[in-house]
Image: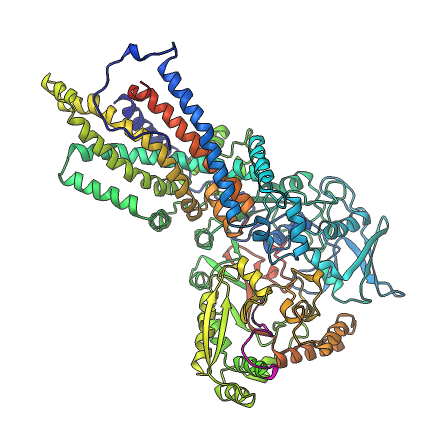
Amino acid sequence: MTAEVLAPTEPPAADPARKRGGLNPLARYLLVRLALLIPMIWLLVTLVFLMMRVIGDPIQAALGGRLPADQIAERKAAAGLDRPILTQYWEYLTGILRGDFGVTLTDNRDVSDILVVNGAATLELAFWSLLVAFAVGIPLGRLAARYRDRLPDVALRLFSILVYAAPVFFVGLLLKLAFTPFGWPSSGRASTGTELTLQQVEPHTHIMIVDAILWGEPSLIWDVLQHAMLPAIALGLLTGGVFIRLVRVNLLQTLRMDYVTAARARGVSERRVLSKHAFRNALVPVVTVMGMQIAMLLGGAILTETTFEWKGLGYALAEYLIKRDFLAVQGIVTVIALIVGIMSFLIDMIVALVDPRVRF
Amino acid sequence: MKNVRRGVAFVAITAASAAALSACGSGKSNGDSGDGLIVGTTDKVVSIDPAGAYDNGSMIVQTQVYQYLLNFQAGSTDLSPDAAESCDFDADDGTKYVCKIKPGLKFANGNDLTASDVAFSFKRIVAINDPNGPASLLGAMKSVEATDDQTVTFTLAAPNDQTFPQILVTSAGPIVDEDTYPADKVLDDDSAVEANGFSGPYTIASYEKNQLAEFKANPDYDGTYGTAKSKTVTMKYYAKAENLKLDVQNGDIDVAFRSLTPTDIASLEKNDKVTVHKGAGGELRYMVFNLNTMPGDNPDQKLAIRKAVASSLDRDAIAESVYKGTYTPAYSMVPDGQAGATEPFKDLYGEKPDKAKAEGFLKDAGVATPVDIKLQYNPDHYGSSSAEEYAAVKRQLEDTGLFKVDLQSTEWNTYSETYNADGYPVFQLGWFPDFPDADNYLSPFLTPYDDKQSGNFTNSHYNELGTDFQDDEMTKLLDSERVDGDQASREATLGKIQQRLAEQIPYLPLLTGAQVAIAGNDVKGVDTTLDASFKFRFTSLSK
């Protein structure tokens, strides 16, 4: 992650003298970040490649014990695994650039197909989870700051620790036990009928809510929303717990700033001080931390997706790890690394847009 | 602040919309798909293409969409013509097995199904020899040719091989369309669905691999299974048995087939909304003794130890306490119910632990007690109850005071490599038959090692790595039963093989499992499909 977590400080005055070479500071900042993104992604994919080689030969891992040695050797040769490691590395890198992540060993499936179908599911889950995290974290963090050291604050701090510390599969299981007796869907991304209907949507995005909206049938949208609720809560609470504490701490720090004191001295109401002057600044670190939370969400998605039969990248990763299909694992982990790298860059961009201190 | 308000407003609008939509919808409005059925499973499809799959999940799909030359009618293990009009051994040359194809058969894509397609289907399985494929099943076939448009002739390694017709019904038997399937590689699933080269009772209407597959009845199907009772059947794939159980008990799916835990099954038996259906068992759970590395200083001592172990086990207790009755005791490698099955282990070593007998075996061979046994099991390939099962085996052996068991477990990939490399002295394995014939429970384990049969659970340590054990008489008996067309005399030979195996105990059968499916009370035809053919036919199901 390249974003820096900034503690709230006084908003700086614009300094035109710092503009150099005629290049907009924001553009310069983004160019630097973009230039750093390339080596970062290169490093990530190289690490994935090396890790996959350290754990052993993927053909032997997937097919060992099921084929005689000569056939294993034949398949290694066909997959290019008998070539020098640098040649394999070069093919791996050029394959990524072409969007070619190979074919799984255990079920003859294009890894890129898994990335599209399951990646869309994970993207959807991440979206819903972030929505839950924001919906829970921001208002509750604000509430905790407002009632500092009083009962609501103590209760909310406890709650945030609890949801952050509780394993996501445990929260998922509790949610399932609590909701399924009332007929709430406990697994999958939609009911079977809905899924079958949405498979006919053109263009088929594999993002259920988008496909349901494209289909235009309200009951299908509701069905998709119902199915998303429990996994989104399970995963979103994990990040929501972090957001509660982050918003609370930053808001309390901001409220101690001189410009807030000045606003109060001018007779601005406490409600307006909080909402207009302090709250927005307190949110900047939340945006920054969001980048790191995306990596955490993807990690948490493995357990959440398995618990709720949400067939995303985490689900696929767990399945192929069990089958020791390391070619599939390599492709999925590479894409997760790429997502984290690119999201980190996007978050940097957003932070630079909302916080001038970053770009000056 | 505006942004926050917008965010709160967005969430509020989403919630309000959801509530409004809730009022429009009826909760599970799309929980079923018209008149069709939804079947759930935790099995996974490796490949729709028969050349690339030899597993239960793929076989369920293949059973619905492909035709075979021969097939089993519901409730029967007798072969009936499917795509073939007739099949028989050539009267003059027993190595030739000749099938006449029904005229006028077509694939769903409109292409003709001819003898050439049949020959092509078998040839490509052998040529591709995919590691996940069934090429090893075709070891008995030397070649196959389309003699004319309607005739296909198989040349076999041995004359009158009685198991070969059964192999035509296995994962090696589906007939594919020569014009849409490549000869040299496995066709990926999406292309197979698009090619629509199916001539079975169903075609695939929509498909998301290992997520959801919708099957539509094929109106042009002309084969053993007859007209499908349900026009649409949807297969839903699960990662976790607990979710499969929840969905079947909530009525979100109609049938759950493979694989719920024994505890889940026992719990569902008390549920009024669903019925637990149990069918003929085929799966076998057994222990293997590595004749090289097992305890004992010489072959006599090793045999005595094996006999003492066989005399110390209470299979019935394991079946009840661990598997809640979903498995039953197995006293032969050939499970009860198969033609020719006998129970020599019961006769030789008894149903209940017999300490005096076990002690006698050890004493006569001069084996010092307690005998240290390193026992390995696998926790992730034969079901999650393996740990409990082998804990029970350890307890029963140690209760005699004659054994001290060091019980260990290893995950499957390492396990499968290690047992093949003489890594475990005594270990767990399981077997699911390719076809319902006693030979399929014997030959793969007892025929002399042949590297072409790897992947067929040939017990390589038993024959390949130079152990002293070489039972020529056993080989002769197996060769004889395979080509014996007289059922009574064949069953007598099968009995001798089972007796001989029980006397030598390279393998110790423990339990045999019933096929189990859970279905809503309104679902019909489940019992019909849970027969000894081990083929789960959607055509039998309706509601």
**What is the residue that sits farthest to the right in this orientation?**
B92
**Residue A45 seen by the camera:** yes
Front residue of this view, candidates A230 and B476: B476
In the image, is residue A285 above or below residue B112?
Answer: above
**x and y, in percent, of residue A273 in the image:** 17, 22
Front residue of this view, candidates A279 and A25: A25
Front residue of this view, candidates A124 and A89: A89
Give the residues in magenta: B284-300
**Residue A312 seen by the camera:** no
Q: Residue at x 60, y 63 (%)?
A: B432
**x and y, in percent, of residue B277 in the image:** 53, 62
In the image, is residue B433 above or below residue A251?
Answer: below
Q: Is residue B15 left or right of residue B317?
A: left
**x and y, in percent, of residue A186 in the image:** 41, 47
- Residue A185 is one of the magenta-drawn residues: no
Task: Give the position of the N terminus of chain A as an image quadrant.
Answer: top left
How many callouts does the rendering have? 0
Q: Residue at x 75, y 75 (%)?
A: B476
In the image, is residue A128 above or below residue B97?
Answer: above
Q: Residue at x 60, y 77 (%)?
A: B505
- Colour scheme in the image? rainbow
Give the quadrant of residue A6. Answer: top left
Front residue of this view, candidates B175 and B273: B175
**x and y, in percent, of residue B384 in the image:** 47, 61
